[in-house]
Amino acid sequence: MAEIVIGVLLVPPAIALAVLLAYLVSLYFRQQSIVFRPRAESTGRSPADIGVAFDDVFLTCASGVQVHAWWVPGRLRKAIVFFHGSDGNLTYEVQTLRFLEKLGAAVLLVDYPGYGESEGRCSERLCYEAGEAAWAFVREAKCVPAADVVVFGQSLGTAVATYLAATRECGGLVFQSGFTSVPGIAVSIFPLLPYALFWMFARSRMNSLRRIRSCRCPVLVLHSRGDEHVPIDHALRIHERAPAPKKFVELHGVHFSGEWRNDKRVSAAWQELMDGATGAWRARPAMGGTR
């Protein structure tokens, strides 16, 4: 009888453990599709829809894969290279382009392999290759000085922008709604499991928290406390680790909110970065504030 009671008591934890292990194994094999969610279909929109002249270009990555990009000339001898998040493709970013082109700089918006009209299948390495191809286009084909190039990433794109800013001289890094690393995001979702477990089995790490230390340019961090996908703690840690000059502006809204485009504090911070007026940027985050 005692053995039966013990058996009954042991079955639920054993089943729970088996289910958890099965789920973790499933996550391991599905993690690339969780991190990268490309869309090949277009919204049908382009810069022409907002009256902006542009060139359709295809950039060749080191592996030979071609990625699609939009090049928008500017009135200033400066350039912004934009990397979007894990969902969608360039055609979802027309409103972001509207905000950026008002700053006067040229803008290059880049898709990752497997996104939109780009070839291949996405991975961490190929994301960085797309970033390198974008950098080469702006620097070599368009002859923009490195100190006049600002790299701007949103969400997944922050990892690509940080990779470039950590390995090259540039004029600035804008880190919006980004994360410290892929394992760091996993820990935010599963706080009871050890970080080392996720680090060991991560096929994509995208460790911006480590790379941010190597940046030698002004860093603007933008994040919302209401972000339901990436806790604001990720952005605060990035800001803390980044060398000065650096600035933190707290956004409003959820992860995919476009409210930031109408936020005067965001526009002012961007203008300071583009003007090279970052000497007074504070080391401590500027939290809250009015729109």
Image: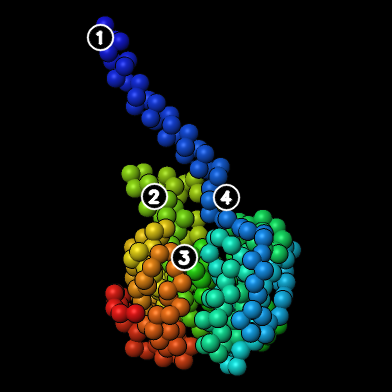
Q: Which residue is mark 2?
A: 189
Q: Which residue is mark 1?
A: 2
Residue at x 42%, y 74% (from the top left corner): 259
In the structure shown, which secondary structural element does the residue marked by tag 4 occupy?
Answer: helix
255 w.r.t. 98: above or below: above
Q: Quadrant of residue 225?
A: bottom left
Give amino acid for label 1.
Ala
In primary-sequence order, the first of circles 3 and 2 is 2
Q: Which residue is mark 4?
A: 33
Q: Is residue 12 left or right of residue 102?
A: left
Separation of marks 4 and 2 at Cα, in angstroms: 17 Å
Q: On the rendered image, what quadrant is the N terminus found in?
A: top left
Q: Which mark is residue 256?
A: 3
- Residue reaching furthest left? 2
176 w.r.t. 101: above or below: above
Whether the residues at callouts 1 and 2 have beta carbons within 8 Å, the answer is no
Q: On the rendered image, what quadrant is the C terminus found in?
A: bottom left
Separation of marks 3 and 2 at Cα, in angstroms: 18 Å
Separation of marks 3 and 4 at Cα, in angstroms: 19 Å
In primary-sequence order, the first of circles 4 and 2 is 4
Separation of marks 3 and 1 at Cα, in angstroms: 56 Å
Residue at x 45%, y 59% (from the top left corner): 181
Whether the residues at callouts 3 and 2 have beta carbons within 8 Å, the answer is no
Q: Position of residue 246 (x, y in %)?
A: 38, 79
